[in-house]
């Protein structure tokens, strides 16, 4: 594409973080925003100088002036809005998770295939500086042969919007599983076995029928001798916030820091050293490099992603850049619809396994065309 990609953003809580990134990206044009609250919509539009404003998502995707939409709305809306936007001829970026059911995952894959438009799940973890560094360690042979992978995402969600209350932990598992499968050469998961542990309050349990405080799963990597372990908790489990992954190889192993700020550890046999993770802003166009360490707000009003986890490991501009460049270069994005469906299905199937007492659950297989088989 010779012309810049004209983008609209739906959902302006976390979504507002991306407005200046797209605005400053050399191949993009930040064209429209959408939020149900007209007062909030106008406040943000005025702050960033965006004239095209919508209180209706359907109206925004009907706008012929837009090439693509970035969806940052509540989880229950992701699938329907992604499908509607693809069918409206828009490229779609959507925050995690892709969907909440296997049928929705299949439908998004089919909609992407049928529309010929790009779908990208905006999974922050595989664009974080920590991931980019460990990927280098795997590629240059420092880690050696991969032997085992472990991921965890533990976060207390009390006080968050109501749709989070009682959510099955594994229904929001992409931060835990995605770096593991991506480091395993972009492999997909084949099946899961998951157990639930502990109990949350009856009031929370009643929302989704999910009683567990913690869910832990073993994941078999397809066409590989590797397996992975992931752990998720959302409520009533005492733990400092963490989105982590650890990688064990025959030459060295990387373990995530136990306490924020303590630094990760690289093991080589009996030797261990704490390492510093470099930033990877140099991989980005110069106008958006600063957004790996700085959000759109001042320190007093920093988004939660910068209060917890350093802005998702500096991933936001990398995500936006990959989405835009995939459209410009007319190629699939790194986290395309089939990959996103697999990563999301890991959590859906893991919860199903936990509710059945730990039975094996096979993930649906999607061929390159996107049809389930």
Image (spheres, helix red, strand yellow):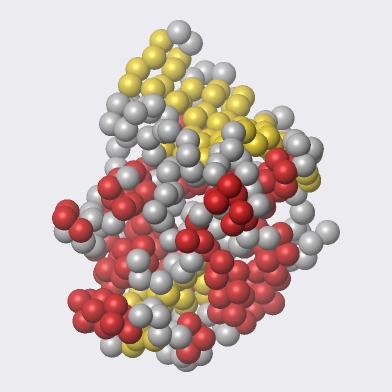
* Residue 351 position (above or below residue 218): below
Residue 286 in picture, x, y percent from top left? 25, 59
The residue nearer to you, when weighing 140 against 87, is: 87
**Residue at 59 percent of width and 57 percent of height:** 207
Quadrant housing residue 119: bottom right
Q: Is residue 340 left or right of residue 10?
A: right
| Residue at screen point 36% across, 57% down | 316
Q: Is residue 103 visible?
A: yes
174 left or right of 101?
left
Residue furthest out toward the right: 373
Q: Is residue 206 left or right of residue 49?
A: right
Task: Tell me the residue at 58%/61% (across/down).
Answer: 98
Q: Position of residue 334 (x, y in %)?
A: 53, 56
Left or right of residue 326, residue 259 in this image: left
Q: Is residue 180 visible?
A: no
Q: Quadrant of the C terminus?
A: bottom right
Q: Which residue is depicted at the point 48% across and 82% down?
A: 57
Where residue 20 appears, x then y in whole percent? Answer: 27, 68
Which residue appears farthest toward the top when viewing the image?
Answer: 270
- Residue 56 image point, x, y percent: 45, 85
**Which residue is more in the foreground, 36 or 218?**
36
Q: Quadrant of residue 321?
A: bottom left
Picture quarter with the N terminus: bottom left
Number of marks in the rendered image: 0
In the image, residue 316 sits, relative to residue 269, either above or below, namely below
């Amino acid at each position: 594409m010779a012309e810049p990609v004209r983008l609209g953003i739906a959902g302006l809580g976390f979504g507002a973080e991306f407005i200046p990134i797209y605005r400053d990206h050399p191949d993009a044009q930040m064209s429209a925003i959408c939020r149900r609250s007209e007062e909030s919509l106008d406040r943000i539009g005025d702050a960033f100088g965006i004239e095209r404003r919508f209180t209706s998502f359907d109206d925004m995707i009907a706008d012929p002036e837009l090439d693509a939409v970035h969806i940052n709305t509540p989880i229950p809306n992701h699938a329907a809005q992604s499908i509607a936007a693809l069918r409206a001829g828009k490229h779609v970026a959507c925050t995690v998770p892709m969907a909440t059911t296997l049928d929705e995952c299949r439908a998004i894959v089919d909609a992407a295939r049928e529309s010929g438009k790009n779908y990208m799940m905006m999974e922050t973890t595989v664009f974080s500086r920590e991931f980019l560094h460990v990927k280098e360690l795997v590629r240059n042979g420092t880690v050696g042969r991969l032997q085992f992978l472990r991921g965890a995402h533990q976060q207390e969600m009390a006080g968050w919007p109501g749709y989070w209350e009682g959510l099955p932990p594994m229904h929001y598992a992409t931060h835990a599983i995605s770096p593991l499968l991506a480091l395993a050469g972009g492999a997909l998961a084949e099946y899961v076995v998951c157990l639930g542990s502990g109990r949350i309050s009856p009031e929370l349990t009643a929302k989704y029928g999910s009683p567990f405080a913690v869910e832990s799963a073993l994941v078999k990597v397809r066409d590989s001798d590797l397996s992975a372990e992931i752990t998720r908790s959302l409520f009533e489990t005492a733990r400092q916030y963490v989105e982590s992954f650890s990688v064990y190889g025959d030459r060295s192993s990387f373990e995530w820091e136990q306490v924020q700020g303590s630094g990760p550890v690289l093991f080589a046999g009996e030797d261990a050293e704490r390492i510093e993770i470099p930033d990877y802003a140099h991989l980005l166009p110069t106008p958006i490099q600063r957004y790996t360490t700085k959000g759109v707000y001042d320190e007093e009003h920093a988004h939660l992603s910068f209060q917890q986890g350093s802005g998702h490991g500096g991933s936001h501009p990398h995500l936006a850049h990959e989405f835009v460049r995939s459209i410009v270069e007319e190629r699939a994005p790194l986290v395309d619809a089939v990959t996103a469906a697999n990563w999301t299905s890991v959590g859906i199937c893991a919860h199903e396994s936990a509710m059945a007492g730990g039975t094996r659950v096979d993930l649906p297989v999607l061929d390159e065309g996107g049809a389930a088989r």
